[in-house]
Image: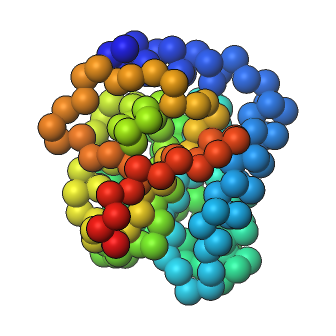
């Protein structure tokens, strides 16, 4: 299927989930992610804050866990493109015009070497190609990252369909975490 078709299909599938289903599935994804990657104190993780009206994976549980484990946490903020703002337990957030909760601070950390970058998506195929919301923020962000930063997608749904219109400038994920498994697309260049 084409990205536009997949975007529409998986947005509808996600919206069809009840709040309870989304919460329970998010918990499974969280557990799979923590069990597989075993993040430790001092590591740096960039993670998105969920857009609740789109029923995104509840990453708030991830963020709380990371902060409790003394893992450095960075979240995206749309400024001139996507910037990374380091957050702390007392960071103040506000909702932007797109309904995304972001830190009030506009201070870009300048960080480009993260241990893990946990990325939003609507769909990911078996090769790590992702379908996002179509704005291109994450493809541009991925280009700025250190080659050692592992890009991790999280999704409620298995990668059962082929994305027919992958572009040359699309940057695939290294891993996909679902409710049942962790898939590796990593090319081995660690």
Q: How is the image coloured?
A: rainbow
**So how many labels did they put on this image?**
0
183 lies left or right of 112: right
Q: Position of residue 131 (x, y in %)?
A: 39, 32
- Does residue 86 appear in this view? no
Examine the rendered structure and indicate whether residue 107 appears above or below residue 154. below
Camera-side residue of 33 and 67: 33
Q: Quadrant of residue 88?
A: bottom right
Examine the rendered structure and indicate whether residue 149 appears above or below residue 82. below
Examine the rendered structure and indicate whether residue 158 appears above or below residue 188. above
Q: Say which quadrant the C terminus sits in.
A: bottom left
- Does residue 165 appear in this view? yes
37 lies left or right of 125: right
Examine the rendered structure and indicate whether residue 182 appears above or below residue 122. below
Query: Which residue is painted at 76% across and 47% down in the image?
Result: 28
Q: Position of residue 188 (x, y in %)?
A: 34, 64
Q: Residue reaching furthest bottom?
A: 42
Camera-side residue of 126 and 110: 126
Query: Which residue is painted at 62% across and 18% down in the image?
Result: 13
Q: Position of residue 138 (x, y in %)?
A: 33, 48
60 lies left or right of 151: right
Q: Residue reaching furthest front?
A: 188
Q: Say which quadrant the N terminus sits in.
A: top left
Q: Position of residue 103 (x, y in %)?
A: 52, 61
Query: Which residue is painted at 64% across and 72% down in the image?
Result: 38
Query: Which residue is painted at 41% across and 63% down in the image?
Result: 150
């Amino acid at each position: 299927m084409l990205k536009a078709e997949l975007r529409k299909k998986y947005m509808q599938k996600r919206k069809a989930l009840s709040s309870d289903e989304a919460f329970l599935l998010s918990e499974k994804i969280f557990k799979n992610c923590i069990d597989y990657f075993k993040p430790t104190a001092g590591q740096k993780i960039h993670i998105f804050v969920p857009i609740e009206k789109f029923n995104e994976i509840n990453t708030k549980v991830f963020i709380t866990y990371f902060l409790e484990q003394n893992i450095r946490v960075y979240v995206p903020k749309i400024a001139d493109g996507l910037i990374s703002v380091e957050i702390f337990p007392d960071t103040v957030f506000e909702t932007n015009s797109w309904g995304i909760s972001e830190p009030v601070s506009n201070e870009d950390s300048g960080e480009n070497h993260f241990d893990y970058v946990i990325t939003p998506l609507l769909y990911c195929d078996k090769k790590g190609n992702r379908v996002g919301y179509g704005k291109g923020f994450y493809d541009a962000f991925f280009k700025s990252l250190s080659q050692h930063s592992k890009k991790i997608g999280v999704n409620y749904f298995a990668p059962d369909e082929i994305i027919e219109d992958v572009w040359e400038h699309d940057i695939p994920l290294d891993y996909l975490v679902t409710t049942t498994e962790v898939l590796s697309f990593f090319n081995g260049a660690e």
